[in-house]
Image (cartoon, rainbow, N blue to C red):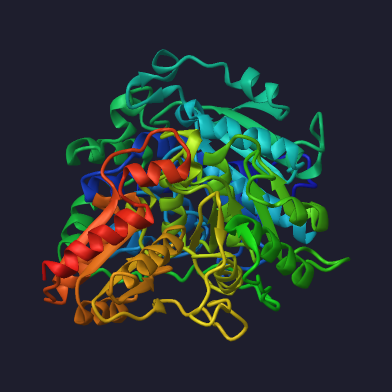
Amino acid sequence: MRKLNPEVLELSAEERQWFEEAFRRCARRVLLATTLAGSGHPGGSLSTLPSLLMVYALARVNPENPRDPERDRVVISHGHISPGVYSVLAEYGFFPEEPFLLEFRRAGSAFAGHVEQAVPGVEWNTGNLGQGLSAACGMARAAKLKGKAFRVFCLMGDGEQQKGQVIEARRWAVKFGLNNLCVIVDVNGLQIGGDTYQVMPQDLAAEIEATGWNVLEVNGHDFEALYRSLRNFLTGEVPRSDRPTAILARTVMGHGVSFMENDARWHGMPLPPDLCRQALAELGFDPEELDQWQERRKNHPVSFPHQSHDPEPVEIDPGEPLLYGPEVKTDCRSAYGKALLSLAERNNLPGRPPKILGLTCDLEGSVKMTAFRKHSPAAFHESGIQEHHTAAVSGALSREGFLVFFSTFGVFAVDEVYNQLRLNVLNRTALKIVSTHLGADVGEDGPTHQCVDYLGLLLSLKDFEIYLPADPNQTDRIVRFAATRPGNVFVGMGRSKVPVILDEEGRPFFGPDYRFEPGQGDWIRQGEHGTFVTYGTMVSRCLAAREILSQRGLSVGVLNLASVRPFPREDLLRAAEIGPILIAEDHLVETGLGARCAQELALAGKAVRLRLRGWEEYPSSGKPDELFARAGLDPESLAREMEALIRSA
């Protein structure tokens, strides 16, 4: 692998010649791979090749140990240039060129159409433009927190600079002093819609400078110029050495093939075979090799395996649970704040890098993170009103050996950042989202803030565990449990104060002997005639409805399904054996727990009288109790509905 010493002022003639020849070899692979696959993005791959070759030559990366914790990180934000990335990684010995050329964009292959961590040398799955810089910020911040010397390089396209999340990430990088972060923007001036400035005018240099970055502008096809600019970053020879650096590499789309240059068609379209042969000849290669590769690809089995890319593990002491007595009436978010402080006291020790990080978006007090901030100021990250970036940077931090809590209101933690959470899942992050202010329990804030659709979204995110505690005691237990989980976890709660859930002897149900178990329901009350199935703020309302029914001679159970994923299937089926089920939730009926339960019952072939009660439409502004009463979710309405259900059986 060609490695360069940034202490040297300039490239040698031999090195310049090597890079020119390496460019031709990589361009050949780009053209072959995309034409063989019949799809792909050759134009931007060709214009970015010089930057890719120079970055990997200067970065501390080792093809023999691509996951070395001390490595520099290279993030490719415009993931569609995968042909260029894979070509350069093959050039530097991360893998042979053969599986790349024969398996690019084939089902089951690691060599996907957009870059994925399944390939050695790739740090982050990208493709949805504008998110790579946020991930790079997370990696650079991790280095600062740990006192590590690794640097982070983020390659981007000029078109994706139109994304708002990019601006969020730039500001965040300056706030947290990420002078170990360098962005290289491929400014080729073209995107799918044509001329980038015509699609959306912007002055990149002025915009980036306005957010406080160092900005260097170079000819992106001049290896000497690229070397000098990257060397300046690595040696700190930039105008402000305490700031991140952006290199604007002016390039030509389709560089190296005369008839492809400055033609937006080749952004996302491969050359047909005849033009591919012509391009290969122009680059100095045998045009007939395309036919040989085509023949080999026909019967080649997919052989290159996906590489493991699990998050860096972190050992956490969950501490001792706090107990809230019967006399206490508080909100679950306050219990979360106390549990988070307790975790910090156990794990964020003086004189050592923090293990637990907290991020929020201008809602520190509302999500009860103030005590955590005071205890662990370096671990607390106020990101401002920048939810898209914060969701992504939190995910990246969670892969770097930290337990990361991202907390904000439900509409911001789920609805607003669904795409960012989806990419976190694809990147195998280990993020802990603790979302407050869920449901119509937000009340007077009105429908824009009443998050009553979150379960439908979260259940579409594969592998996200989902927990919805019923009271402060269960909140404390679930937060501590989530802290020990290896993957992504969502913990959700309302805003209002709720009573401590008690057993039939008047003691806290989630008391000293309670242990939270994922995939298990909590039979808070047993019944003989039917069962309320519920969670969160509705548990106390269902218990009140049960008491009304007991005065009418009916025995009804209350089953709390705080664990939505993994789902307590056996508990639900047990409830179906008892009698009718009424599912009550502060959520849209169509996409909430009721729909999930109906699915499970149908799949099990279980016939039961079932009623789903929640929101039929988005609620209005008003006090929570008034809103719940209007929707038939108050105790009296629930009791009346359950009684009718039982007596009609």
Residue at 26% in and 44% down = 616
Image coordinates of residue 391 in percent, x first then y, are: 54, 47
Q: Residue 221: tell me if it is visible.
A: no
Residue at 48% in and 56% down = 89
Image quarter where the C terminus lies is: bottom left
Decide if residue 220 is on the left or right side of residue 598: right
Residue at 34% in and 70% down = 551
Say which of 422 and 640 sits in front.
Answer: 640
Image coordinates of residue 307 in percent, x first then y, are: 44, 69
Query: Image height check: is 255 above or below 475?
Result: above
Decide if residue 526 is on the left or right side of residue 216: left
Image coordinates of residue 558 in percent, x first then y, are: 36, 72
Decide if residue 379 is on the left or right side of residue 186: right
Say which of 92 and 493 sits in front.
Answer: 493
Say which of 485 and 565 sits in front.
Answer: 565
Residue at 29% in and 72% down = 531
State the image quarter where residue 546 is shown: bottom left
